[in-house]
């Protein structure tokens, strides 16, 4: 148990352990009952419901947060979301959520809007340089394609659950006796004497004769088996190769500009002065002063700020949160708003300048227009080519003929089902690799396959030209590798025999020093080692071996170097003194406490499920996870 705790309290390993602990909670009480209730519900517990929309929002939220924390610089693709099993993780998390939601409902836990605003403002997801960023918040809503009200409802439910969990688990920690026991376990040290055993030149394995090698090869033939290969022709048509903005005439670009002038309007922008207050009461008092005749400039001075400090813009309506934009863009120039609630605190705003909407000059948008027209032209050309190529394939045209006719690149490769060539090189440029290889290996020779749609735009046609069956390689083909592997096995056998013979001499009474002298080496001594220390000589398994036997014990360690054996004797075992609970680092103690809290959390969930069992809408579940009914 202590070994498990020690390992799981190290850095990210603890997080993985806890994640697995959370995901396994379903196994504690069995599979939730499948049922069909309303059209939109997915999971229910008592009167609490998680519907399909909530699942999709949770999936998008989790995917976005993972993408941002992993610094991808982009959203996960659908394939990546499936690859990392994010849907399953989210679904399991929602099962926990709905159980807690039912407990929250029964306890009538509520949170004020100010509390929610403060919590959202403290969410690192929406922070930049340690402060809440409206731009990040707006970008989040746009990425998830949700309204602020939907987000606030989702976030409020989550925080209510967090409040319940916090109240239930606050103050939970391991007893000091446990910390002390783990400290003793971690700080115990051992020192060992050892000698390094290796093979002398005359003891090493020589090349086998043909008969010996053949016998060995016959029993290891499967290790040298060649996999099935398939020779495949690839014909690609990529959008990027057809997009040529330089071929768009200037008069065509200008005509598009004239006909679509509304698309090139610069939006109305406003410059504002945003005076923020710590509380709603302070903001209301300031608004009353303005109503009583105090000027905005005087109010700014009274708040010990400058106009420069609070000026923002010019800003378009789309650059502001909706609740602010609707207020600001109803004001006239010079007009002062009423108090507006904001996530960072209440504000009073004055509009100082209005730049009306205007048509952007052609020169400013010409490049974008050319790109748009070139893409449209390329899409038309590719669509025509696609239809023509498919018709030609139906009439029997080969991919080589089509490549010549349409000036498209044709590539022929021989690969196995993992994407490796006959030279053992892994192909890294295959689009949708898993889908493509699966289709190739389900096909037969010369069968016309449906083209693959490329994510970046375009198509990939492919055909299996030849199937090269898996086969046993002959000894002549792999002789060099076979000899190398045979010698490696013989070396290990000779090493083991030499080490076992040396160990036998020690157990019969010979000293380590005299044995070392007889073997032409020297006795060495390790430094004081703890369980978590590293050793280049012993390796991780060697250190573990030192701590599994009593003082004075002899033994053999393979060590990290395959051509050596370590013969050791445990010299000293030191149990540390003056150990207290605080000998452990705060980080380790916190990780242990977190594990205890998670264990108690699972107990709470188990009881909640007994009171109001989870039920899953089978139809919606099957729809989401594409499971046959």
Image: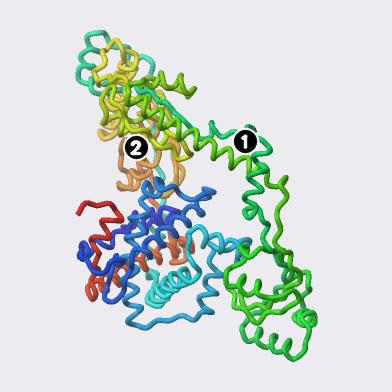
CA–CA distance in space, label 2 to label 1: 33 Å
Q: At which x and y percent is residue 192?
A: 39, 42
Q: In this view, does 333 lie to the left or right of 181?
A: right
Task: Tell me the residue at 37%/25% (across/down).
Answer: 392
Classify the position of the N terminus by image quarter.
bottom left
Q: Nearer the observer, disc 2 or disc 1?
A: 1
Q: Is residue 197 visible?
A: no
Q: Which of 55 and 362 is in front in this view?
A: 362
Q: Nearer the viewer, residue 438 or 599?
A: 438
Relative to 601, residue 544 above or below: above
Classify the position of the C terminus by image quarter.
bottom left
Q: Write down the residue under mark 1.
A: 245
Identify the secondary structure beneath mark 1: helix
- Label 2 crowd (10 A; few <14 / some 14-19 / many >=20): few
Q: Write down the residue under mark 2.
A: 435
Q: At which x and y percent is residue 19?
A: 37, 58
Looking at the rendering, which quadrant does residue 501 occupy? top left
């Amino acid at each position: 148990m202590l070994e498990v705790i020690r390992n799981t309290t190290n850095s990210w390993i603890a997080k993985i352990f806890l994640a697995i602990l959370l995901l396994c909670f379903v196994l504690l009480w069995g599979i939730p009952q499948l049922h069909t209730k309303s059209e939109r519900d997915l999971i229910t517990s008592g009167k609490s419901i998680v519907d399909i929309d909530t699942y999709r929002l949770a999936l998008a939220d989790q995917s976005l947060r993972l993408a941002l924390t992993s610094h991808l610089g982009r959203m996960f693709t659908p394939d990546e979301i499936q690859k990392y099993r994010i849907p399953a993780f989210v679904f399991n998390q929602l099962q926990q959520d709905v159980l807690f939601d039912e407990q929250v409902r029964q306890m009538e836990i509520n949170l004020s809007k100010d509390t929610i605003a403060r919590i959202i403002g403290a969410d690192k997801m929406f922070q930049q340089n340690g402060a809440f960023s409206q731009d990040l918040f707006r970008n989040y809503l746009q990425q998830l394609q949700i309204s602020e009200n939907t987000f606030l409802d989702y976030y409020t439910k989550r925080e209510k659950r967090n409040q319940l969990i916090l109240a239930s688990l606050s103050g939970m920690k391991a007893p000091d006796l446990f910390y002390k026991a783990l400290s003793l376990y971690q700080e115990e040290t051992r020192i060992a004497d050892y000698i390094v055993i290796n093979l002398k030149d005359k003891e090493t394995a020589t090349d086998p004769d043909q008969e010996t090698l053949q016998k060995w090869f016959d029993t290891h033939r499967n290790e040298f088996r060649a996999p099935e290969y398939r020779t495949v022709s690839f014909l690609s048509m990529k959008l990027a190769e057809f997009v040529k903005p330089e071929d768009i005439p200037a008069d065509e670009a200008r005509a598009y500009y004239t006909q679509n002038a509304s698309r090139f309007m610069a939006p109305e922008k406003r410059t504002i002065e945003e005076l923020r207050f710590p509380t709603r009461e302070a903001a209301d008092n300031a608004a009353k002063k303005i109503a009583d005749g105090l000027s905005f400039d005087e109010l700014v001075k009274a708040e010990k700020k400058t106009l420069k400090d609070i000026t923002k813009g010019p800003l378009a309506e789309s650059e502001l949160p909706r609740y602010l934009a609707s207020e600001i863009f109803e004001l006239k120039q010079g007009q002062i708003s009423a108090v507006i609630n904001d996530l960072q605190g209440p504000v009073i705003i004055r509009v100082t300048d209005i730049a009306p909407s205007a048509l952007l000059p052609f020169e400013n948008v010409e490049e974008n227009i050319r790109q748009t027209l070139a893409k449209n032209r390329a899409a038309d050309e590719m669509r025509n080519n696609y239809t023509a190529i498919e018709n030609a394939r139906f009439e029997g045209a080969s991919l080589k003929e089509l490549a010549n006719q349409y000036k498209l690149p044709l590539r022929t490769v021989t690969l196995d089902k993992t994407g490796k060539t006959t030279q053992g090189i892994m192909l890294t440029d295959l689009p949708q690799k898993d889908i493509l290889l699966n289709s190739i290996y389900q096909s037969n020779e010369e069968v016309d396959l449906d083209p693959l749609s490329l994510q970046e735009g375009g198509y990939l046609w492919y055909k299996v030209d030849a199937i090269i069956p898996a086969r046993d390689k002959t000894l002549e083909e792999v002789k060099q590798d076979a000899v190398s592997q045979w010698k490696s096995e013989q070396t290990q056998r000779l090493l083991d025999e030499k080490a076992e013979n040396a160990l036998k001499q020690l157990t019969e009474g010979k000293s380590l020093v005299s044995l070392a002298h007889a073997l032409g080496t020297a006795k060495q001594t390790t430094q004081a080692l703890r369980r978590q220390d590293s050793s280049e000589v012993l390796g991780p398994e060697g250190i573990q071996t030192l701590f599994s036997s009593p003082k004075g014990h002899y033994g053999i360690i393979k060590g990290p170097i395959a051509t050596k054996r370590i013969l050791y004797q445990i010299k000293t075992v030191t149990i540390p003194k003056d150990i207290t609970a605080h000998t452990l680092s705060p980080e380790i103690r916190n990780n242990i406490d977190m594990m205890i809290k998670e264990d108690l959390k699972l107990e709470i969930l188990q009881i909640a499920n007994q009171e109001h069992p989870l039920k899953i809408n089978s139809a919606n579940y099957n729809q989401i996870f594409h499971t046959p009914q």
